[in-house]
Amino acid sequence: MFLAAALQLNCNSNAERNYAQVRELLSRAQRYGVAFAASPENTNYLGPHHEKVRLAETMEGPTVERFGALAREFGLHYLMGSFNEKSDDPKRCYNTSVLFGPDGAVLGSYRKMHLFDVNVSKDVSFVESNTVVPGAAPVVVDTELGRIGLSVCYDLRFPEFYRALTDQGAQIIAVPSAFTLPTGKDHWHALMRARAIENQAYVIAPGQHGPHDDDGLRLSYGHSMIVDPWGAITGMSSDGVGLALAEIDLDRVARTRRGMPVADHRRL
């Protein structure tokens, strides 16, 4: 059993400001005794998307290095929810989640597969594929804390994707997000609980909150949360920058799966 934290941020195009938010919250998390912490999608930068592409870096660049150094400084497993990873396409980057061990080493990374190309309303209209290249495969990382399945934001709407993570052994699923306010207020809680219940896994969902200076996303919903394998929300953030804290008990995952062995009952 260990304590986990979902970091709730309010990021913008000021990378130093964003980094300072993460550092402060990881420092607080360490004081609570947190072993695993995760920050939202677009942890390092949430601003105009053409600039996101221009500023994109490789996995060997300074962004990954400095956020890995935070994991090492505070001695915890840390998921940088996503950053703008450079691709071979000069007009697009990857939206990449990176998991660090407590020594700061990269344990695994995942490039967001499902891109947010929607026209829901005048408040929710966005074409992520204009600036982002989709990833190619789901990723589950084996760590000393358990097997962690990686995903990013809009992936949440595709239950078959999470079934693939569970089939690969995921016990904990991370869903770092920048969920819009109009979709978040109606769908965030329901989808997070559904993914936890369907997969009988913990869901750790750090989110962005509030306004940003980007050129598409107006307001992020927040409500960062941790959900247990039975679908109970065991930790959740209020408005603003902060932490959602909850215990992770992998024995509870095993008990839930034994008591209701849905994986064994599948027909499709």
Image (cartoon, helix red, strand yellow):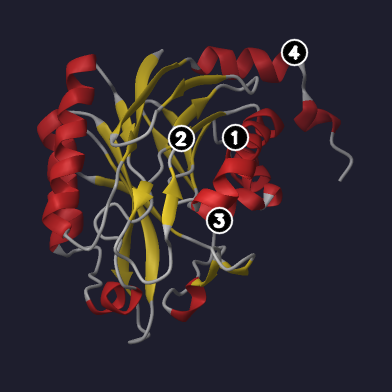
The residue lying toward the viewer, choosing from 17 and 212, is 212
| Distance from Cα at disc 4 to Cα at disc 1 | 25 Å
Using the rendered image of the protein, determine whether residue 254 is visible from the camera's viewpoint. Answer: yes
First of labels 4, 1 by sequence position: 1
| Residue type indicated by callout 1 | His
First of labels 4, 3 by sequence position: 3
The residue lying toward the viewer, choosing from 137 and 197, is 197
Instruction: Check disc 4 and report the residue beneath it.
Output: 259
Instruction: Check disc 2 and report the residue beneath it.
Output: 223
First of labels 1, 3 by sequence position: 3
Q: Nearer the viewer, mark 4 or mark 3?
A: 3
Label 1 environment density (alpha carbons within 10 Å; few <14, some 14–19, many ≥20): some
Can you give x and y, in whole percent of width and height, for residue 48 in the image?
Answer: 31, 72
Label 4 environment density (alpha carbons within 10 Å; few <14, some 14–19, many ≥20): few
| Distance from Cα at disc 2 to Cα at disc 1 | 8 Å
**SS category of the residue bearing label 1:** helix
Q: Nearer the viewer, mark 4 or mark 2?
A: 2
Q: Nearer the viewer, mark 1 or mark 3?
A: 1
Vertical side of 35 occupied by 155: above or below: below
Instruction: Check disc 1 and report the residue beneath it.
Output: 189
Label 3 environment density (alpha carbons within 10 Å; few <14, some 14–19, many ≥20): some
Using the rendered image of the protein, determine whether residue 138 is visible from the camera's viewpoint. Answer: no
Q: What residue is at 38 percent from the left and 80 percent from the top? A: 92
**Residue 95 placement: quadrant:** bottom left
Side of 263 where 155 appears, left or right: left
